[in-house]
Amino acid sequence: MKKVTNLFVALMAVVVMVSCAGKKSFNALNGEWNVVSVGELVVPDSVDAFLGFDIAEQLVYGCTGCNQLTGALPAEVSPEVPMFAAMGSTRMMCTDMTVEDALLPALGQVVDFKVEGNNLYLLNAEGNTVVSLVKR
């Protein structure tokens, strides 16, 4: 009976590991990240574009370099649900809207991310980086 119990415990551990393997945690995103580039556009140091993540509250916030952003993160990363689908922003006109005009549509394409050290890469459905950020 003890061998059967040990086998059952081992099988349950494998089931748990496999079921969690496909899910990605947002925990690595926690904190604030400066936007470095959007596609081919390099964001000048003079533009304060950033994204912030409050994982405990499942919130995302930030600035496009002109307008403020706020919204909710989805429950999990999924190629079917854009990460930034539930976002709102202020709509002021600014002298230079170049970064905002690139960033807002790019965020609408994001379905995944990867974190490498202090760098965050927001990825589209094809796995291409659409926004690059660095930890503040």
Image (cartoon, grey):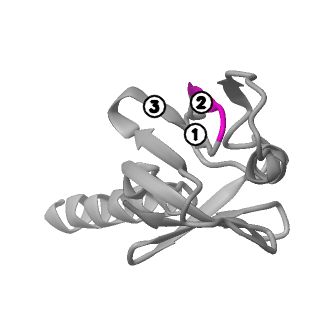
Residue at mark 1: 63
The N terminus lies in which quarter of the figure?
bottom left
Q: State which region is magenta.
A: 66-71
Q: What kind of residue is marked 2?
A: Gln
Query: For the residue carrying disc 1, how many other residues have a C-alpha within 10 Å: few (<14), some (14-19), or many (20+)?
Result: many
Queried whether the magenta region covers residue 49, the answer comes back as no
Tell me whether the residue at label 2 lies in contact with that at label 1, contact meaning CB atoms closer than 8 angstroms.
yes
Which image quadrant for residue 94?
top right
Dominant secondary-structure state across the stretch colored magenta:
strand
The residue shown at (51%, 55%) is: 19
Q: What kind of residue is marked 3?
A: Gln
Queried whether the magenta region covers residue 69, the answer comes back as yes
Nearer-the-camera pick, 126 or 120:
120
Which image quadrant for residue 130?
bottom right
Mark 3, mark 1: which one is toward the viewer?
Answer: 1
Q: CA distance from mark 3 to mark 1?
A: 17 Å
Residue at mark 2: 68
Please provide percent x and percent y for residue 15: 45, 58
Q: What kind of residue is marked 1?
A: Cys
Tell me whether the residue at label 3 lies in contact with that at label 2, contact meaning CB atoms closer than 8 angstroms.
no
Q: Is residue 11 left or right of residue 39?
A: left
Residue at mark 3: 58
Nearer-the-camera pick, 117 or 93:
93
